[in-house]
Image (cartoon, rainbow, N blue to C red):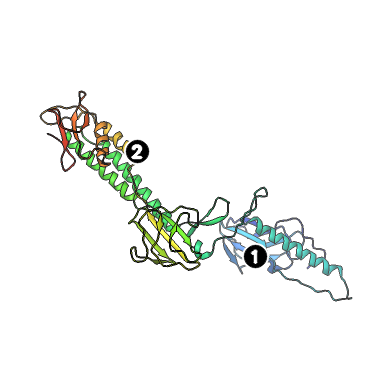
């Protein structure tokens, strides 16, 4: 090792990309001995197949591979020192400049090593306020996403299974909505074809509803001991709300049986269980209810509006298919349960509470419009 090595202001890490021809790669930082240099090809550390030159030189050195790294391979060279003291000074003994210089060089190199690792880690901005960045326990964060609460601290978020299921449900709903639009657009102009388009549209709506009903919210409560009722905000600040009869509850991973282990009746609290012990974790999975949205109704109406005048066999009654589709949506939503329908002066289908005209229609048990 050179006695006048200087640890300059050079980052102790460098990367290059191989071209399949070049076998020599230069590093610009000093190393004390050859084993201080770590060599990686992509993410695999290399323990052989190369030689190192330039140990003890201020300007650095080079790595020579026995076989040139393949093209597009990332070559990473970094100085990595063992944290240790290399010498000791005896009381009243000789104090050699070369020895103290080596010790100081080693300390500076260790500081550069730590600085490089800090730069590559998650840190707060210098202008940011203080906040604890301690991760949740590994049992809590396993297979889960990491999110930040209102204070900016890391907390456990949804698990990967929940996210994958939600994405799958969204895809099903999107496909169902597209199928509904295609079905409505391709309906024929006669009454039979119109009823078929209506059935396909409502079937697609049902698929979207069924897909959306598979989504659910997850609430987690960590007990402090003695609780016999759970309600309000959970560990992540989410207020408990559920639809009775469609919840799954477990304690520390063991599934509870509703009515035997707990009672979930009012939609906002859980009760009827034995007092919890300190540290018990209760997980409540609440399946969400789903109501047909205005956007879906508009999709049905848009598809139906593309179907022009409907001709009923025997008589011609021109009706607005947009109004007809909206009536069908209202029927699905139980808005006109048990109502009658009639044709107004414009030939549009209108709801009425009783049959008062000779051209009045009502819905049969299949949901079809039939003359009285």
Rendering quarter of residue 183? top left
| Front residue of 256 and 304 | 256
Report the residue that reaches farthest toward the top.
Answer: 345
> Alpha-carbon distance for marks 2 and 1?
61 Å
**Could you tell me residue 111's position as x and y percent?**
73, 61
| Mark nearer the N terminus (2 vs 1) | 1
**Could you tell me residue 112's position as x and y percent?**
72, 59
Rate crowding at label 2 as few (under 14), some (14 to 19) or many (20 or more) other CA atoms within 10 Å: few
Give the number of the mark in front: 2 or 1: 2
**Could you tell me residue 297's position as x and y percent?**
31, 38
Give the number of the disc on residue 48.
none
**On screen, residue 320 above or below 50:** above
Residue drawn at the location 31% of the way across and 50% of the way down: 210
**Could you tell me residue 368's position as x and y percent?**
17, 39
For the residue labelled by badge 1, is the local secondary structure a helix, a strand or a loop? strand
| Front residue of 80 and 299 | 299
For the residue labelled by badge 2, is the local secondary structure a helix, a strand or a loop? helix
Residue drawn at the location 56% of the way across and 59% of the way down: 70
**On screen, residue 293 above or below 285:** above
Rate crowding at label 1 as few (under 14), some (14 to 19) or many (20 or more) other CA atoms within 10 Å: some
Pointer 2: what residue? 294
| Front residue of 103 and 180 | 180
254 left or right, relative to 320: right
Q: Are marks 2 and 1 in contact (CB under 8 Å)?
A: no
166 left or right, relative to 18: left
Pointer 1: what residue? 38
Rendering quarter of residue 182? top left
Residue drawn at the location 29% of the way across and 34% of the way down: 301
């Amino acid at each position: 090792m050179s006695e006048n090595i200087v640890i300059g202001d050079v980052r102790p890490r460098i990367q290059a990309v191989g071209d399949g021809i070049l076998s020599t790669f230069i590093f610009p930082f000093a190393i004390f001995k050859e084993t201080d240099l770590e060599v990686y090809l992509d993410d695999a550390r290399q323990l052989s197949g190369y030689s190192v030159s330039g140990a003890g030189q201020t300007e650095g050195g080079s790595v020579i591979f026995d076989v040139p790294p393949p093209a597009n391979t990332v070559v990473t060279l970094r100085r990595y020192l063992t944290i240790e003291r290399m010498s000791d000074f005896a009381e009243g003994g000789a104090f050699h400049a070369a020895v103290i210089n080596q010790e100081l060089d080693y300390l500076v190199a260790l500081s550069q090593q730590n600085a490089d690792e800090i730069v590559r880690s998650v840190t707060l901005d210098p202008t940011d306020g203080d906040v604890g960045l301690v991760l949740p326990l590994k049992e809590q964060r396993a297979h889960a996403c990491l999110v930040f609460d209102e204070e900016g601290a890391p907390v456990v978020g949804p698990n990967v299974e929940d996210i994958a299921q939600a994405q799958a449900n969204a895809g099903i709903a999107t496909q169902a909505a597209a199928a509904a639009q295609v079905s409505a657009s391709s309906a024929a102009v006669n009454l039979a074809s119109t009823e078929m388009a209506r059935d396909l549209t409502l079937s697609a709506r049902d698929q979207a509803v069924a897909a959306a009903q598979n989504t659910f919210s997850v609430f987690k409560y960590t007990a402090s001991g003695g609780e016999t009722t759970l309600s309000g905000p959970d560990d992540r600040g989410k207020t408990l709300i559920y639809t009775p009869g469609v919840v799954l509850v477990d304690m520390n991973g063991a599934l509870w049986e509703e009515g035997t282990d707990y009672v979930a009746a009012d939609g906002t609290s859980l009760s009827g269980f034995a007092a919890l012990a300190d540290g018990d974790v209760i997980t409540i999975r609440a399946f969400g209810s789903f109501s047909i949205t205005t956007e879906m109704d508009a999709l049905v109406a848009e598809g139906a509006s593309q179907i022009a005048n409907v001709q009923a066999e025997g008589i011609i009654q021109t009706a607005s298919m947009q109004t007809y589709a909206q009536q069908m949506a209202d029927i699905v939503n139980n808005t006109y349960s048990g109502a009658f329908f009639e044709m107004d002066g414009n030939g549009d289908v209108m709801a009425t509470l009783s049959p008062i005209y000779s051209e009045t229609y009502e819905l049969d048990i299949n949901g079809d419009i039939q003359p009285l």
